[in-house]
Image: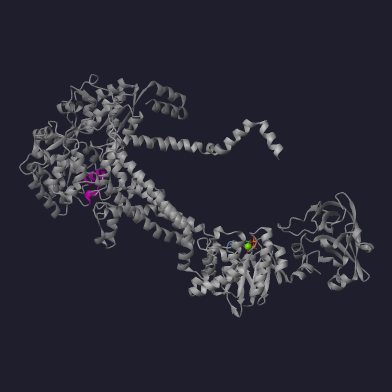
Amino acid sequence: MARVQLSGLTKAYSGSDASAVSDLSLDIADGEFLVLVGPSGCGKSTALKMIAGLEESTSGEVWIGDEMVNDHAARDRDIAMVFQSYALYPHMSVFDNIAFALQIAKRPKAEIRERVAEVARILQLENYLDRRPGSLSGGQRQRVAMGRAIIRQPAVFLMDEPLSNLDAKLRVQMRSEIARIQHRLKVTTVYVTHDQVEAMTMGDRVALMRDGVLQQVDTPERIYNRPNNTFVASFIGSPSMNLYHATLVREGSGGRVRLGDVELSVPASVYESHPALAQTNGAVILGIRSENLEDAVFVPNHPEGQQFTATVTLAESLGSDLMVHFRINAPPAKIVDQDLLDEIAVGDDFGVCVGRFNARSAAKPGDTVNIAIDCSELHFFDAENGRAF
Amino acid sequence: MKNHLIGALLGGCVLATAGTMAAAQDKVVLTMWHGHPEWKNAVEAILARYEEQNPNIDIQLEEIPGQSLIARLNTALAAGEAPDLFALRLGPAVAAAGEAGQIIDLTDKVDISGMTEAAQSAARYDGKIWSVPIFGSYTVGLYYHKEIFDENGVTPPANKTEFMEVCRKLQDSGVTPMIAPAQDGVIPAFLYMMMASSVLGADGFEEVRAGTRRLDDPDVVEAARFLQDIYPCFADGSLGTAYTEGKALFALEQGAMLEGGSADYAGFLQTNPNIDVGVVPFPAVDGGTPATVTGMQDTFSVNSESEHPDEAIAFIQWMIQPEAAQMVADTITLSNTVGVSPSDNPVMKEMVEASLSNDVRVFYEFPETGDVFAAIQENAASLFLGEITPEEFSAKLQAVVKPSGA
Amino acid sequence: MLAQSRQWDGRGGRRRRQSALARRYGHLLFVAPGFVFFIAFMVLPSLAGFAVSLTNWTGVGTDFSFVGLDNFVEALGSWPLYRAAWHNLIMFLAILVFQHTVGLFVAVQLHAKPRFMEVYRTILFLPVIISLVSTGFIWTLMLSPNIGVINALLKDLGLGFLARAWLSDPDLALATVIGVQCWNVLGWAIIIYLAGLQAIPEELLQAAEIDGATGWVRFRRVVFPLLSPSFTALTVLTFIGQFRVFDIVYVLTGPLGSPNFETDVLATLIYRSAFGGSSIASNDVRMSYAVALAVIVFVIMAIASTFLIRVLRRREISA
Ligand SMILES: Nc1ncnc2c1ncn2[C@@H]1O[C@H](COP(=O)(O)OP(=O)(O)OP(=O)(O)O)[C@@H](O)[C@H]1O
Ligand SMILES: [Mg+2]
């Protein structure tokens, strides 16, 4: 069990001028489950491999426990890794796959048998020990990969998108299984994913990266509710946060925000929780989570300044909710990222806004509906650099 | 044959302009396969002369090195795609092709009365003429470098004792006595035929064919012993040296002597224009008469599927007339036409002289002794290496003789 | 559902039958072109060849008679067949060992992407693309005790005592032919093993590294077992290649497998039986006998390579 510290970790692959990871500093507590998320190509695997010692860092330090391990080979770092592809040895039985590290370390046969049996029991693999990976299902393979990691009783688990090869249902099941095992073994874990649901549900903390740069590291709640910048805001949460260019004007203890042809009042509580807003007068980026938009029919007595009307362009029922898309006459703030295709611009001056309405809402395309917005949950970002106030 | 022409025409349509097409159609094209790339210039000169005199004929010569030629020819004959003119190995092969109707019976079509006795008898097989030796005949004797002999104070040996003496002297002064490329066993086979002939003579050979004399008779075994005894005189690596490489080595004076035929001299000259060699009959087994052996060079036949048999036959007839025969004698080898001798080739003259005393026909042109050559090829190496005795060797040869009397 | 199918039935019984036929045999249509060629150029000639082997046809003319299995009986009772097969076997084993050691070793070195890798690779693969005939010819010249550079080089290096009559010394000739072939086939071994190495996922090797296996242990426990498809392919290709080797032997040591048949192989034996040992004279050529030899070799090789593939495949799976 060990604390893992990264300081100023940087990796530039030879042959490319941009760094795959730049100046990454993280302090992962002993026994913590840290999730590393970010869009494809942002450097998650690279960061993980540098911790594992499979990839040399260009600069910066990796500490495991009290030791600076930069010069330690992978096998000497007391880590175990679960690969995205599982990387099971296809020519060995499940038993040998799990036992391989112990066999290499020349542990006594009896001990190996015992420990494999123990791991197999935890992972419910007892009936498959003689099989070869080729004849296992995806979930079983995934568990063998886990088994290979936990049998070593390492100080740190590194997992690189271990669930990405599984179907949705199995993924949900394995998600909780991994969380359960980690909880039980209390091994410091760095878990890479680009699935934000995994990030939100599994981690003690979530670290979000973009283009090799760490954007925010925080608990799942805080990263959702208090995103550092528009990128974090739009990456975390589904559907993405609605982001528009808007104008904020101070008015008394509160304020007014102008969103296209709609004016909304900003309650004083918002200014209290975001003191930096007080200095702002003018252009901002306004962020609205879909769950803060509701068909006004279901919110009687909603304050007058926190309602507006819009024309529905699309209504999708999720069963529990009705996702309603409507036009907003304000320029959307674009987050440049090929992964986030749900940001659809309608002309230059119009944006699509998505609201999560009560499932019983009657809104249908073409309707003009009255929409209630919870203005105490509005997010404001600097219009120039996208940083949160 | 048709296929050939169609192929040629198709190729022509694509490649040739209309003008050359017309020209090509006017001419009679005869195709001819030939196994001696080393005679290229000489043969082309002869063909050019013929085409000059017969402007309507275009002979297309393809040269295919000997061994490949046989494989290709067998296949082509079976497939009906052989050329108009080609040479089979003289002997049973020619007769078989004739009886199979693959070649034209030339008996009444070609007049060979102007050829030497030996050539006439070689051309006739059971009274029929299936093929004609148009490129002369070859006599095989012993070539030696005059300069090397002079420098070492030796003279051409006439018998085994002298040969071994010459061999020793040359070796003492660091000269390789004899080039003997034995890889394919051809050279050892010729050596043996000459050695055996020195004992047998032409008459004795007839007796072997008839079955009244045997190759394992004690006096003939001495020939095999001679063959075994001269092995140490061979150049290094002789057992692995190919025939062509050996000829080049001799031409480049890498050894003092080489068993060789009249047809080889042109090749030597091509490799080394300054070569100065003499030729004598091969030394005799002690007590015998130094002998040469003579065989017919490529005996040409006419494809029975030829589109132009008359033209092909006319060409063969022309080849044995004195004019062409003279060119053969001057540039390739000895002529089969009576009265034609090399005009300005002292080495060929020496060869003719060498063959005057004791010349025997090569064994493989006769059905009775046809397989002896192959038996020598197969067994010479083990004789050289001492794995078998001369007696055993001779017995193996006698075993494949099919005496006509029996 | 029922109604639907009945309707379908009534409307076009014939069409349905056709489509069932097409479903069952339709695939044949796709293999037909290849199959026709296979029949025309492989099966028919083989059958014709077998027919020839039952006669005493010499190869020239049309004079022959049926002799039954005489050629086979004679061939199977003849010493040269076994001698030649023995030489093929030695060549196969020697070259096999060479490929699986030196070839694999070089492939592993190249896989590590050393500097100038392209240069090495080109040099090592060059012999493969040079025709065997040229290869043989070049080596005959180099190995010649009279004019060859190899002995000259040895002498210049002060190693003159190593100079040999490489191709004509009965004790060395086979080894020399094997050596030349090794030079020639090394490129294949490298390419096949390199392909195998490249097919091993990087993550698998990283997993082994994390598991503590490095260097030789990792090679033996992880890399080599994963190369077993390459091993199989190379072994089978070498087997087939070495039991039908001809060109290079013929060019190096002639139709008689000189010296004294020390390098005689099945193909030269067959060739000699079919076309004779020299261009000058060979009357004991018997095409039918040669074809019988070829049929024997074909049958034995077919059985042996099937067996070999079976064994190696099983090893692959259980490795
Ligand atoms: N071996 C390499 N050589 C050069 N560049 C590389 C190498 N491996 C990764 N990169 C680059 O480094 C960047 C980060 O790659 P990395 O694999 O860490 O991304 P990732 O966040 O794991 O992405 P994904 O979610 O798709 O797995 C990418 O731009 C990638 O192209
Ligand atoms: Mg990755």
Q: How is the image coloured?
A: one colour
Question: Main SS of the magenta segment?
Answer: helix
Q: Is residue B370 above or below residue C233?
A: above
Which quarter of the figure has residue A295?
bottom right
Residue nearest the viewer, comparing C210 with A73 = C210
Quarter of the picture holding the C terminus of chain A: bottom right
Is residue B248 highlighted in magenta?
A: yes
Residue at image coords 19%, 30%: B335
Residue sticking out furthest to the left: B287
Quarter of the N terminus of chain A within the rendering: bottom right
Nearer to the camera, A166 or C59: A166
Q: Which residue is depicted at the point 12% across and 41% down?
A: B195
The answer to which image quadrant residue B107 occupies is top left
Residue C62, picture quadrant: top left
Q: Position of residue C236 (x, y in %)?
A: 41, 51
Region of the chain picked out in magenta, as a range: B237-250
Image coordinates of residue A198 in percent, x first then y, are 70, 65
Q: Residue C284 versus residue B190: which sits nearer the camera?
A: C284
Total tally of numbered discs in the picture: 0
Residue C281 within the magenta-colored segment of the rendering: no
The x, y position of residue A155, in whole percent, is 60, 75
